[in-house]
Image (cartoon, rainbow, N blue to C red):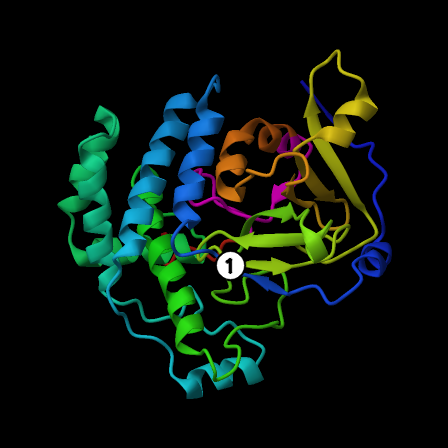
Amino acid sequence: MGVTATVRVMSPEEIAAQAGGETPYLLWPERSTVFAEREMRLRQLAAQHPMRDFLLFAADIAKAQQTLLARYPLVALPDEVSLDRAARQAASPLPAIDWPRDAAWRDGLARLLNDLSGSAPEAAREVIDRVLATDASWLEAQADCLLTGVTRGLDLAAAPLIAAALQVYWTHLLLSVQADSIGRGQPFGRIEDETVCPCCASRPVASITRNAGSLLGQRYLQCSLCNLQWHMVRIKCTHCLSTKSVAYHSLQPADAPEAENAASALAQAETCDDCGHYLKIFHTDRDPHVDCVADDLATLTLDLLVSESGSRKHGVNLMLLFGAPDPDDPPDPGAS
């Protein structure tokens, strides 16, 4: 396998000109299907995949997430004053780092783990039992690590399970605030930092191009936490916003015609020479069943090859975290 970047892509100005009417800035997850569709995609991708067992377990997690979201209890939401303040400050109204988490997320974690325990692989069951036996303070500390992006002190085995419960909680928050605001104005919109989620200020997991109607060719970033998608023109670095040094790389068999593969690649890594970061981009015109979280997991080889060139990932997939701390992480206050 190799990496290539040969497709001629339009400039941001050309894309905007071809878009015609106004492109919606936000696309919302569907409460009834968001995790169910992810489950189906993971099971589809698992067939004949080297990471088959992992992808199938991730599918089981997504199934449990959908069950949990469907019966989530009422939780505290920001009031109109808080939403108005966030809008005036161009800030996320439900910031992952600062939002006072409702204890319901821990109850949800327990329900999710109990749903998983019967079918989980033996190694996963040991982790599930351990997490179920821990106290609230440990869970909250792990949540802090996950939501701030600090890997020091994070239990990497338990992290995907805890993250799964946090994803459901924040997706529920997002959809509840949106539903509660009907008739009173849009609670979410553009924020000062367009590289992070307008709802919770989390990093994206990947980006995706749309192929339907007015969205044809438009690129959206998908939040790694709350599943909200926000628009960003293509050929623009998702980390530093540069449009000068962006390139696209994809995997190809050694004997495949380079141009043919690049033009049909479902997954590409969008790299930026200016800042040294990258983010994957998936194309729904090449497969309408793409799910950013699922397909990001299934294309780990692309991450490894791009990382070998020195690029760092702008996004994060909370279902698969590694132990090496990012140089941009804040210092661990417990380190000596």
Q: Quadrant of residue 133?
A: top left
Image vertical order of residue 87 relative to residue 127, above or below: below
* Left or right, residue 49 beside residue 233: left
Q: Can residue 313 be found in the magenta stretch? A: yes
Identify the secondary structure beneath mark 1: loop
Q: Residue at x 37, y 35 (%)?
A: 58
Q: Main secondary structure of the magenta part?
A: loop
Which residue is disc 1 drawn over? 228
Q: Residue at x 17, y 40 (%)?
A: 130
Q: Can residue 333 be found in the magenta stretch? A: no
Please state which amino acid type lies under the numbered disc 1: Leu
Please state, as top left, top right, bottom left or bottom right, where the N terminus lies in the image.
top right
Q: Residue at x 51, y 80 (%)?
A: 86
* Left or right, residue 238 beside residue 109: right
Binning the other alpha carbons within 10 Å of mark 1 as few (below 14), some (14 to 19) or many (20 upward) gives many
Q: Residue at x 22, y 30 (%)?
A: 119
Q: Residue furthest top?
A: 255
Question: Residue 331 location, x and y as percent?
Answer: 45, 56
Image vertical order of residue 268 relative to residue 188, above or below: above
Q: How many marks?
A: 1
Question: Residue 15 location, x and y as percent?
Answer: 81, 55
Question: Residue 277 location, x and y as percent?
Answer: 66, 46
Q: Which residues are magenta?
A: 306-328
Judging depth in this view, the residue of 71 and 300 nearest the camera is: 71
Question: Is residue 185 shown to the viewer in this render?
Answer: yes
